[in-house]
Each structure stands twice: as C-alpha cells, then as structure tokens.
Image (tube, rainbow, N blue to C red):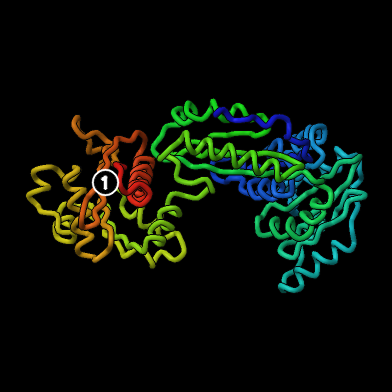
Amino acid sequence: MQPTPQVGYKERAMQAEIIAVGSELLTPYRQDTNSLFLTDRLNRLGIEVIRKTIVGDDRKQIAGAFAEALRRAELVISIGGLGPTEDDQTREAAAEVLGRRLRRDEAVLREIQERFRRYGRKMAPVNERQAMVPEGAEPLPNPNGTAPGLWIETDGRLVVLLPGPPRELMPMFLEHVEPRLRERAGDVLLLTRELRVAGMAESDVEQRIAPIYTRYEGVQTTLLASPGEIQIHLRAWTRDPEHANKTLDELTDRLAVALGTHLFTTRGESLEEVVARLLNTHGATLALAESITGGLIAQRLTSIPGSSSYLVGGIVCYSNEVKTAWVGVPAELIRQKGAVSAEVALALAQQIRERSGATLGLGITGIAGPGGGTAEKPVGTVFVALADGRRTIERNAHFPGDRERIRWQAAQLALDLIRHYFQFPTGQP
C-alpha cells in the first residue's frame, strides 16, 4: 500500500537566530556548545532556529551580524561579549544597531559591587562597563557572574543578550528568558522522531527510505552519518499535534519496514542503551574480552546507570600472552590462526564466559592501525564473536578510517551483535 502523503501542515513558527560572540570560537581550541543548548530549548517552545552565526570580538562584525539577523528573524539571541574588558563589545554593537544610547544602570552597578563584597574582593573600575545598558533594555539578573543579561524589545522583534559562560547562560535563560518566550511563541509545536540504523552506509539508507519520506511534504527528514551508525531525524512544525503525531508515527512505521533488522531504535537511543535494556529484560549477564577496542565496549555499557546488573566485567587482552594466561585462549591456536582471526575471537568469547560465569561472553580482536596490517588482514580488519554455552555467533568486517574511527566502529559492531542475538534469536545476525 502506498503511503498517504500529509501535505501542507507545516506551520509558520516564530523564527530565531543565534549569534555566538568570541574570537576564541573561531579557533580550533574552543567549541560553541551554548547554541546547542539554546536550540534545544527554543525548539521545545516551538521556536525555529533558522541560522547560527559565530563572530569574533570585533564591534563592526558584531554589529553587522545583529543587523542581518534582525532583517530575518523575530528573535535574536547573542551569546558572550558582555564582560568588562575592551574586547567585550556586544552591548555596544547591539546599541549601535538599535539606535539606542548606553546609560549606566545604578541598580545593576550596585548588584555587581555587592557581588564583589560578598567574595571579599575589590571591584576594578573596568567592571563598571557591565552596568552600561541600552536605553529601554531590561537587565536580567545573573547570580552566577557579574555580567547581567539584557532583554530588548524593538519594532516587534526581541533581542536577548546572554553571557558566555554556560553556568551563567543556562540558568539565566531557563529562569528569565524561557518563561517569557513561552508566552510569545504561539501555538506552533515542533514534534520529532529519531530513528537509528547500524550496519548500513548512508547512501544505502537513503536509497531505501527516500521513496517513502519524500511523499510526506509536511515532515522535514534529515540523515546524519557517524561511524557505524546513521541517524534519521523527522521534524514537523504544527498547530495540530494529534494529526502530526499520527503522520509521524505512520512515516516511522513505514521507514522501519524498509530498514528491517538494521533499525535498532525509533526513540533516539544509543546502541549501548538498547543493548543494556535487552540484557536487563532477558535477565542476562555479559563478560567481555576486548583486544582491538581496549575496553571501549565496557566503557560504553558502563556509561548507562545500573550497568552492574548486567555487566559482570571484562579483560583488555592486547598481548597474546594475556589472551592465553588471563582468558585461556590456547597459545597454539594463536600461532596457527593469528591473534586477529575468527577462531581467536570465538575462543575469547567462550573462555571469558566460562571463567566469569556470565550468560554471554563476547570476544573481539582486530587491527586498528595505523600499522600492523597485511595483504590478507589489512588495517581495519575486525572479528567479533558471542558465546552463550550452547552456540556461538560471529561477525567480521573491514572498516576504513583512522585508529579512533576503526575502534569505535568495532565496538559498534560488537554491540550490534548482542542486539541481534536477542532480537533475532533464530536468524543469522
């Protein structure tokens, strides 16, 4: 049956732009994570972020960013540049673009002075700059720092200036900005779904699902590729959540059929979260013998709260001697087949299960590089096996990329093998 497209229910949401100010954000040494937080919170309010800009500590550049953003969006939020030093130019740039004078707010100045007194420190004269406020702007309290935020309304638009440190920005936004925006955002909501796929290339995923999702004009579909995983994000802006949820559920179901066993979640979970839930649901325990991954699988599983209920433990067995002495892999098997082989992965899985008493044993070995590869077993070769005392199942793969990328994909392969063991017990993984 062909899907019934739901056309034209995307609604016009309030649109916002985010301007991150700071020359350090234009270097390789500092990332702008504040805009990720703000985008998430704005989307929850039904506000669509249409653009993000990073600009250095240059007044002319900052002013240009404000001027451009105000031509496009109803809401402009800036991050950073509210400190006391000469390179903090956000207040001045915003005031210039809005055509407003800066004035000293005595109440703000007293709050800054009081903060210094509480900590037994003398306030430097330069901190008085932080009490300069554009005419008509409302200062936003900052109990975690000296820089107040600013709320400015202008010609039907909103401008919000927030400090840069996350420990100041986040509580200020949640307490003083978000409640006001909730009242103004209107009744348009953003509804989402997130599907995740393992063991497929992005082009293969697209080939399977494009004929389906392109028929749903009211849903924005985005594919994101990362090592060992493809994420499919579905987004719909709507004033009719019942209708939109029904449409999203229908599309999700159709995509799930097309993706088959490669789909491991429709709820945006990580693969380790899915595996942890399966282990707990089946009352199973797991022990690990990791060579190529060096404990990465254990690290990912133990990042989930309550992991002691299903993870017995593991051994990082890089050397052949440890594979034999600690896990029990016969030295002769390693000499005959090589440490990187399906046979050794199987032996690791079987031995670690027997020695630990776990329900399942997993063994993994491979070549992460950059050296160590051969013509028969090039860098990126991985063997993984799972044993339960009755049967063993295995996979092998060859992954491209650098050492870190290969190790991550190897861990992903191993976790996906465990998922298949539970979800498709009668079939081959």
Residue 228 can be seen in this image: no
- On the image, numbered disc 1 is attached to which residue? 384
Identify the image quadrant of the C terminus: top left
Report which quarter residue 401 is drawn in.
Answer: top left
Query: Of helix, strand and loop, which one carries label 1?
Result: strand
User: Splitting the image into 4 quarters, where does residue 189 fall?
Assistant: top right
Left or right: 201, with 267 as reference point: left
Quadrant in the picture for the N terminus? top right
Viewer-proximal residue among 116 and 326? 326
Q: As displayed, is residue 377 above or below residue 115?
A: above
Q: Can residue 51 be seen in this view?
A: yes
Image height of 8 relative to 106, above or below: above
Q: How crowded is mark 1: few (under 14 residues within 10 Å), some or many (20 or more)?
A: many
Locate residue 13, reporting x and y percent. Answer: 77, 39
Q: Residue 91's x, y, as percent?
A: 81, 47
Residue beneath the point at 91% across and 52% down? 103
Residue at 91% of width from left, 39% of height from top?
A: 155
181 left or right of 5 in image: right
Q: What residue type is labelled 1?
A: Val
Residue positioned 59% across, 43% down in the render = 193
Q: Residue at x 26, y 46 (%)?
A: 384
Viewer-nearest residue: 99 or 317:
317
- Dividing the picture into quadrants, the one containing residue 324 is bottom left
Query: Residue 389's spot in the image, x, y percent?
Result: 21, 58
Residue furthest front in the image: 1
Viewer-proximal residue among 38 and 149? 38
Q: Position of residue 199 (x, y in %)?
A: 38, 38
